[in-house]
Image (spheres, helix red, strand yellow):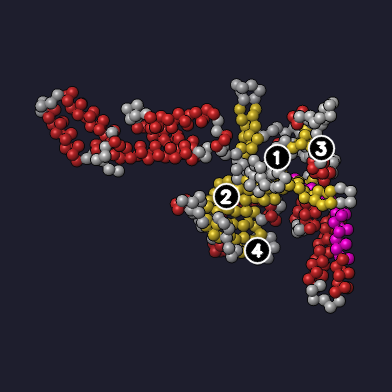
Amino acid sequence: MEQRCINIDWLEVFCKQQIPLTPEYLSAQGFNVEVRDYGTPQYKQMFTIYSDNTKFHPLYEIRREPYSIKENGGIFEKNDCHIRLSNYECYKPNCVEKLQAFFLRFGLIPQSISRIDICLDVLHCDDGKDMGQFIRDYILERYYKVHIARISPHGPEVNGSFFAAHGKEAMYEREYNSIKWGSPTSAISVKIYNKTQEMAEVKNKPYILDQWRAAGLINEADINQAAKLQTVRYNIAKLTKGLNFAKDKVKIRERLNEQKAKATEIKENLKKVWRIEFSLKSAIKGFVREIGNSEDNKKEVMYSLNLDNIQKKSHLLFTFMTLAKRYLNFKVVEMTRKGTPKRKDRCADYFPVGEKDIPIYKPVMPTINKDVARGTKMIMNYLQMLADSATDEEMPYTVRQAMGTTLTWLGHYYHLKQVENKGQTLLHWQDVLFKKQNQILTSLTTIIELNAKINAYDEGKIKEEDLKDYINNLYDHSFNVLQDPSIGD
């Protein structure tokens, strides 16, 4: 069994508050709260809560009081908020269950996962290939990529896909330490990078090293080396700062160079742990696959991307492998007998990591305009045509109201504003029509006249057919009130 370490590296949840989750309220509940002096582009207030006074290990980051309120034409409700796990908390046991307990305790109703990063840490590819070598081979076009594969030479997103790599020039080749497919705005992105190097150069995270040690990726000697590197980095920072004030700058520079050389030596000898990380945005609602052998018994099986389905390590690993089956699917570049490249679909598959027998799931995302099925488009067009052309005699009030409701829902679901507006307009005028009908049928003049007709019929002054004709004409008039300029809105 390959040594692997699966974790959440980022989890942010969109919630609704039943009671205002203010810093004062949380402080009264025993939490240490640190309020930021400024909010975010979406929220006025942002603060971090800690379980104690040390402030070494934050629990959650909370953003609340949105600027854009729906009742003012915005996008948020007043009680909307976002809650993010701290990076430290993400690596704690049962972190999702603890978050759910926090929601339950303080009356927070989770609506959706705004963002989740699921990462798998490994020493090499499943077949033993060095991960850096694999990245290099991909750059040299020895592999094709199947999904999220379009490359832009200048970096901007192209049709939802993006590619970027980082590394350095070595003596005989380029050494790549990271590669990424997908842009910051993509619903799904995937990144492979040297996590050991990142922590050595940016910030050491002992809690991640503890996870690696528990998974068998590193041992005690590796942790000691990482600790030595942190000491050397501290010395470098101290010497660099002291260089500005030292009298003997030559001596300080010598010591600084010694420490830099020592840091380089330690980094080169650190065991490389590579991270494969999927980042999923709120657009991903779950995953679906088809089961059944024939058209008659085919059906879709779906599992949702929610907090219950990411509680356990096994849940995370299944989700990761589901994504890897689709988005870490490469093709080995092969040549024909004539020396030309084979078609991609005829080349052999290659998966750097992943379970080969796992079924293929597709991500479920909200449908946008271009994905509307042809039959659905025909239905929407026909409903709009009927709404514009059918008369009141041909289409009763209840049918027209149902049509307006249907068009409004379809337009909202498929993000077709024109269709949604048509449905809302239809509902509005049906409401106007209903009010005007009532205005005529319940007016004092109508009631007096109707009573007079009924009394005349009781006294035998008019026939039954005459009374029926009067009532029918009254309703016909009420149905034509939209064309009657004498009746106001």
Question: What residue does disc 4 label?
Answer: 52
Left or right: 395 as drawn, with respect to 199: left
Q: Is residue 374 visible?
A: yes
Q: CA distance from mark 2 to mark 1?
A: 31 Å
Residue interval drawn in magenta: 258-276
Task: Check disc 3 and report its element: helix, strand or loop.
Answer: loop
Of callouts 3 and 4, the N-terminal one: 4
The residue lying at 30 percent from left, 37 percent from top is: 482
Q: CA distance from mark 3 to mark 1?
A: 16 Å
Task: Give percent across and percent down for residue 286.
Answer: 62, 39
Of callouts 2 and 1, the N-terminal one: 2
Question: What residue does disc 3 label?
Answer: 142
Q: Residue type at mark 1: give it.
A: Arg
Q: Quadrant of residue 251?
A: bottom right
Task: Give percent across and percent down for residue 395.
Answer: 36, 28
Q: Nearer the viewer, mark 2 or mark 1?
A: 1
Q: Quadrant of the N terminus?
A: top right
Q: Residues within 10 Å of mark 1 (few under 14, many from 20)?
A: some
Q: Quadrant of the C terminus?
A: top left
Task: Give percent across and percent down for residue 121.
Answer: 77, 47
Q: Residue type at mark 4: give it.
A: Asp
Left or right: 341 as drawn, with respect to 49: right
Task: Check disc 2 and report its element: helix, strand or loop.
Answer: strand
Q: Residues within 10 Å of mark 2 (few under 14, many from 20)?
A: some
The residue lying at 57 percent from left, 34 percent from top is: 371
